[in-house]
Amino acid sequence: MMKNKLIGVFFLLIVFGYIAVFFLIRINNPKQVQLKTYQEWKKEYLVNKGHNQTFVNAGSRKNPIALSEAQGFGLIITTKAAKLGWAKEADFDKLLNYYLAHQDYVDDKHTQRVSLMQWKQYYRHHHWISEYNSATDGDLYIATALDTASRIWPKKAKYYRNLEIKLANDILRYEYNPKTGLLTTGDCVRLDSNYANLFRTSDVLPFIFTNLAKTTKNDKWCQVKNAMLTKLVQLSNQHKTGLIPDFAWASKKSVKAVAPKTIAGKNDGYYAYNACRLPWILAKGHDAKSRLIERRMLKYFAKQNIVYGGYKLTGKTLVKNQSPSFSAPIFYGVNHFRGQGFDNLFVSQQYIYSKPLPQDDYYGATLTTLVAVDR
C-alpha cells in the first residue's frame, strides 16, 4: 500500500515537473524570440563605417544604402534592446554619430547646417554620396530615440536632450506648414508650392509629438498632434475599411488621397509601404483618435482570411502575397488590443517569427525587429 502511494506521489511529481517546464518555456520563449530577432537584424543590417559610425543598410551588401528613416529605426531599436540588456550605449552612439555626420544644409550654397538628417547616402564609383534634403519621418524617429536615450543613460542625458531639442526645433522650423498646421514631408518642400499640402500619413506620430511637447515645452507639438490626427480620422472615415493611404492632399479643412504616381509610385494613394506602419504607430498613442483609427483597421484585417501586402482603400488587394512590413505592425497593434475581437490576428500574424529574419528586405526585417523589441 505504501509502495503504491509512493509511486502515485512520484508520478504526480513528474506531471507537475512537466507542467512547470511547459510554463517556463511559455514564459521565456517570447524573450528568446526577441533576442534572436534582434541578433539576426544586427548581424545582417548594421554596417560599421570607420571606427565610430554605424548605419542601417537599406540596400544590399554589394550596394549599401543609408536612409534617415532607417537610421531612425535603428536608433529606436537599439534603445529598446538596451533596456533589455542586449545593447550598450556605445552601440547607440555609433548610430548617432552617423546621423551627426550627415546633417542637412538648408541654403543653396550648403553652408547653413541644421539638425535634420540628409535623407539618403549610397556608395558609387568607389566613394560615398550623400543627397541633400531631409525626410520628416526619419527626423522624428531620431528625435524619439534621443528622448529614450536620455532616460536610459543619465550620465549623458543632457547631451542627448540638447540634441533632441535642436532637432525638434528644426523640424518645426523647416518641416512644418503653418497654413495647414501639418508637418511637410521634408525640408525641400517650399511653402509656396503645391507640395506644401502633401501629407504623408506615416508622419503622424502622436507618441513622439507628446514627448517632444514635454521636452521642448513647446505647445505647438500638441497642436501638430491634434491637427494630424484629425486628418487621419477624416481619411479613416472615407471608406468602410478604415484604411488610410500612403499620401494625401490636405488643406486646413479637408483631406483626400493622392492619385497614383503622384510621389513615389502607382500605390501612392493606397494602403501601401508607408501607411502600413500605422498599426504600430497608433497603438503607441494613448488618445481617443489613435485608438479609434486603430480599431477600425484591425476590425477590417480581422475579417480577412489572409492579410496581404497592400490594399486599395476599398479593400481590394494590391498583391497576392504576405509581407512582414504589413504583418509586423498589425501584430504589434493586436498585442495592445487583446480581447477586443482581433485575437485571430495575433495567431495569424505570428508567422513573421516562425522563420529566419529576411536577409534581402531591410524594411520588413527592420519593422519585424522593431515590433519584437518594442514591448
Image: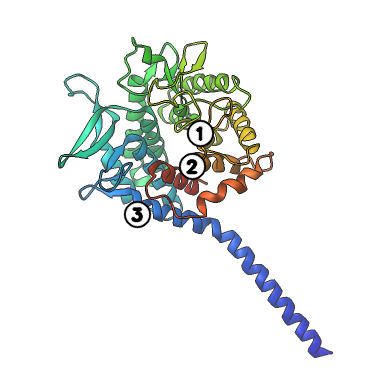
Q: Amino acid at mark 2?
A: Ser
Task: Assess disc 2: are there few (<14), some (14-19) or many (≥20) residues with their C-alpha within 10 Å of its C-alpha.
Answer: some
Q: Which residue is mark 1?
A: 310
**What's the CA distance linking mark 3 and mark 1?**
28 Å
> Label 1 sits on what residue type?
Gly
In the rendered view, would you say 332 is above or below 187?
Answer: below
Tag shown at residue 323: 2
Task: Kindly report the distance in space between the C-alpha atoms of the residues bearing marks 3 and 2.
Answer: 21 Å
Task: State the image coordinates of residue 127 (x, y, percent, origin top left).
Answer: 16, 40
Total labels drawn = 3
Q: Secondary structure at mark 1?
A: loop
Which percent across, then down, holds residue 248? Answer: 46, 19
Q: Quadrant of the N terminus?
A: bottom right
Q: Which mark is residue 57?
A: none
Q: Which mark is residue 43?
A: 3
Nearest to the observer: residue 372 or residue 100: 372
- Residues 142 and 195: in front is 195
Q: Please, what secondary structure does the residue beneath circle 3 have?
A: helix
- Earlier in the chain: of badge 1 and badge 2, it is 1
Q: Position of residue 280 (x, y in %)?
A: 52, 37
Cα–Cα span, label 1 and label 2? 9 Å
Label 1 with label 2: CB-CB less than 8 Å: yes
N-terminal-most mark, 3 or 2: 3
Query: Residue 134 at what x, y percent from top left?
Result: 31, 27
- Viewer-closest of 243 and 115: 243
Residue at the spot 50% in from the left edge and 59% down from the top edge: 32
